[in-house]
Image (cartoon, rainbow, N blue to C red):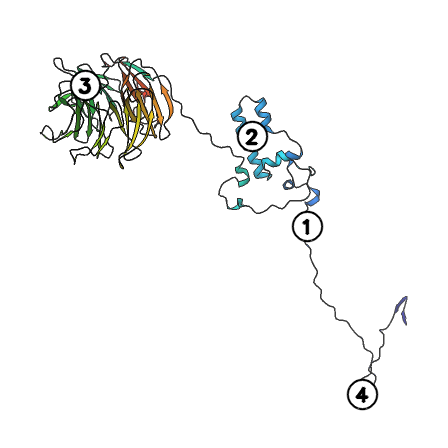
Amino acid sequence: LFQFGSISVSPPSRRGMDREDGTHCAYDYSVRTPVKTRRRVSEPESVLSDRYIPSRTGGSLSSRASIVDEMSAGSQTSPQCTRDEENVSYTQMLRSEILGMSPADRLQGSPESVLQYKAQKRAMSEDVFSVSPGGLRSSSCAPTPRKVQRKIAKAPAKVLDAPALQDDFYLNLVDWSSTNMLSVGLSKSVYLWSASSSRVTKLLDLPGEDSVTSVSWAQRGLHLAVGTNSGDVQIWDTEAGRKLRTLGGHRGRVGTSAWNGGILSTGSRDNSILHRDVRQPDESFAKSLGHRQEVCGLKWSFDEQMLASGGNDNKLFVWNLRNPAPALQFTDHSAAVKAIAWSPHQNGLLASGGGTADRCIRFWNTTTGTPMQAVDTGSQVCNLMWSKNVNEIVSTHGYSFNQVVVWKYPTMSKVTTLSGHTYRVLYLAMSPDGQTIVTGAGDETLRFWNVFPGHKTSLGGVHSHGFAKVIR
């Protein structure tokens, strides 16, 4: 033991070791080599907030503090329910995005403490792949867009007096052109009313005892065909105000006519249908015979390939100009067929309406030649016309309700029923934009109804025009 001052130092232990030759070795200072060991680093089970600051992601503050639900409170105290609902929906969406809280969490609550010091682990969801500014959690908070229900006024937008407007089921005395000009046949005269300027112009007066029995505009809206009781058809240039020609050939009154480009088809009480090309000097180039009584309804299809005709013999025929015989014959109606309308939304779909003894609207597939469905309206069907903008059809009726009905196709549920005429609603026409219809009756009035949706900037809206009080 060596002592250096007050410190004592012990020498290393001397441990002898014999060699193989028998000699004793010197002192062996054995040194143990340290062994490297891997420290096992254990991850904490939960991440703790620093400095005992509560973590917002760990709890739902509003539900644990029993905050009153704004939706229930707002609906009881605020008179502006619609605005309050929108505010509550926006608040719920913010809480869902910022606090990670769903509406169900607020209702169920949680047994844990109000302040949380442990951050909860959030599972990976599909939110990271969403391109929406709000996540999937908040999508349930967003209110469903409300479907705006179309409102149709029960009263007409305007009522015009039309003296001497005939109460005859077989005539067609009102038509609306593509240039927004309304033509009306009153006794032996034809009047034009401009929806753009509200100007009324007398176009013609027939001589003697003759009278106007039909009016029909060409597609371009410049030429007007006027059928007469004597059987003649006059073609007028309405811009120049002069008669271009007079077409003969019928032996009875011409109650209906329809244009197909430059071809004019006319139906008469002599049971015949004449087809004329007004650009040619010849009187007619084709004649269709099949009806046994007066032809009172004619309509060309929108593809200009098929012509539908209805007669007082209760028959509905479909023609093409390549064959003098009718391509299709439908005999299901039990009264005169005046109301005919081709659908602009479905190719080959034809609608027809029967008179007092029938009272049905029937639909036909002219592509296959088969009937589709029939609806008993309970009243005489005078006119049919499809909407240009929506898949709906309007019908006018005579005995005994004198109503105007808008139907939803194909369910044929009533959209609205309009009343006002005191006589049979015998005449129907539609504005170029498809929003407004005009109806005429034996009560000598024309009534304008805003029934169909359309573009606000388009031409022909009734509310944008000043109507005259009398058509002449």
Do the residues bearing badges 4 and 1 touch, measured as CB atoms within 8 Å?
no
Front of the two marks 3 and 1: 3
The residue that mark 1 highlights is 45
Q: Which mark is residue 284?
A: none
Q: Position of residue 284 (x, y in %)?
A: 11, 29
Q: Is residue 253 left or right of residue 457?
A: left
Report which residue position mark 2 lands on.
Answer: 88
Q: Quadrant of the N terminus?
A: bottom right
Report the mark closest to the observer, 4 or 2: 2
Q: What's the mark number on residue 213?
A: 3
What's the CA distance linking mark 4 and mark 2? 100 Å
Q: CA distance from mark 2 to mark 3?
A: 64 Å
Cα distance in 3D space between marks 2 and 1: 37 Å
- Residue density around tag 2, few if under 14, some if 14–19, many if 20 or more, within 10 Å: some
Structural distance between the alpha carbons of marks 4 and 3: 149 Å
**Mark 4 touching mark 2, by CB under 8 A?**
no
Gap in angstroms between the C-alphas marked 3 and 1: 95 Å
Pointer 2 or 3: first along the chain: 2
Quadrant (top left/top right/bottom left/bottom right) for the C terminus? top left
Q: Position of residue 285 (x, y in %)?
A: 11, 31
Which residue is more in the foreground, 75 or 406? 406
User: Which residue is labeled 4 in the image?
Assistant: 21
